[in-house]
Image: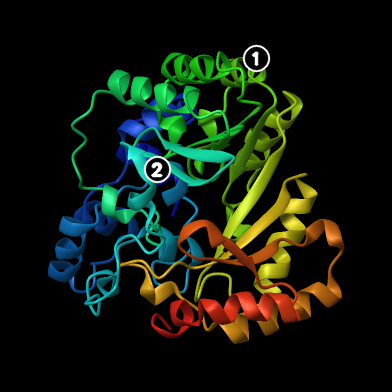
Amino acid sequence: MNKNFILSSFKASAKDWLDWRWQFKNRVTRINQLEYFSGKPALQKETLTAVTAVYPLAITPYYLSLIQSYNENDPIFAQCVPNQREIYFSEGIPEDPLKEDMHMLVPKLIHRYPDRCLAIVTETCATYCRHCNRKRFWLRPNHLSLKNRFQKMVRYISESPQIREVIISGGDPLILDDHTLEQFLASLRTIPHIEVLRIGSRVPVVMPMRITRDLCRMLKRYRPLWFNTQFNHSNEITPESKRACNMLQEAGIPVSNQSVLLKGVNDSPEVMKHLLYGLQKISVRPYYLFHCDPAKGCMHFRTDARSSIAMMEKIWRQCSGLCLPQYVLDVPGSAGKIPLNMMSGAIKNDLKQHQHFFDKFK
């Protein structure tokens, strides 16, 4: 979609466009807005409105501008525009396939592995990705103030000496302002046994102007700090997203990528290879490629596991090791991420134990 048309529609300036607060404030959240910007009527508008009543719509103007075709064949459109399949055929599909809620001994702190935990510091994102495995949180009210949430998390972590790494996630933690985010990071840094911090955020992809010099200077104070983002298609690698990643790297913060394999978006060898080469060119390490979780509202993105393994085997034979992510299936509990890159006997045995996880949600 045309950036200049979007700007003129909002009566905004080029300076506004570069302001992440403006981007967040002016997210597209209604189907009729999509109709207006695309110049096309929404197909089955009533159904899509029903989808957004369950799974809200939010797209930053920047990410909206990356849509080239107003249909499901466009990889950006498919990731951010509601689809009727999100609410159809969902009976029996879990909202929480990884059973994260079972590992929350304090609200929104997931302690699934002994040496690390994941803090959900917000349920809100700049753009709501339609394949998100935490869609269950989008409409669920949070009864804890941010201060109380942080206090309970920090207390639990400080009383758990086996934890050495904390992953700050969400939602998207970078919708918090610098001061609020730093308060949480500073609290974690006072805990002697916390050695490493990690941030998981998609803002370099969907709202890259959030990565500012001030933010990078602040984050640099809390190294060793790692940054994981999520590019799923080469169309998301733009001068703006490249600049955001480079700013983090220049602050001494390694940037890695965790893609999700999505049907119709990146499930062909050519498309995936183009993405991996593009990430290498901007010095972002392809870290994980996740087999899409069998979460309610996401099943239409799931690919066939065996054909996807065959796709990745083709890529492994053709690409440099620096371009290759670890293709994994995430399963509930401490078993965690089962690598699918090399189907060795040991991995096949691990996979067999969780075969129901494949079979039930094909």
The residue tagged 1 is 221
Q: Position of residue 104 (x, y in %)?
A: 35, 43
For marks 2 and 1, give the one nearer the viewer.
1
In this view, 309 is above or below 233: below
In this view, 54 is above or below 151: below
Q: Nearer the viewer, residue 167 or 215?
A: 167
Q: Which color mode does the image show?
A: rainbow
Classify 10 Å Cα crowding around label 1: few (below 14), some (14-19), many (20 and above): few
Q: Which residue is drawn at 59% across and 40% down?
A: 115
Is residue 266 among the parts visible in the rendering? yes
User: To which quarter of the image does residue 242 belong?
Assistant: top right
Q: Which residue is drawn at 49% across and 65% down?
A: 331
Q: Where is residue 55 in the image (x, y as percent from the top left)?
A: 24, 56
The residue tagged 2 is 61
SS at circle 2: helix
**Tag shown at residue 210:** none
Cβ atoms under marks 2 and 1 closer than 8 Å: no
Q: What residue type is labelled 2?
A: Pro
User: To which quarter of the image does residue 300 belong?
Assistant: bottom left
SS at circle 1: loop
Between the C-alphas of marks 2 and 1, the distance is 31 Å
Classify 10 Å Cα crowding around label 2: few (below 14), some (14-19), many (20 and above): many
- Tag count: 2
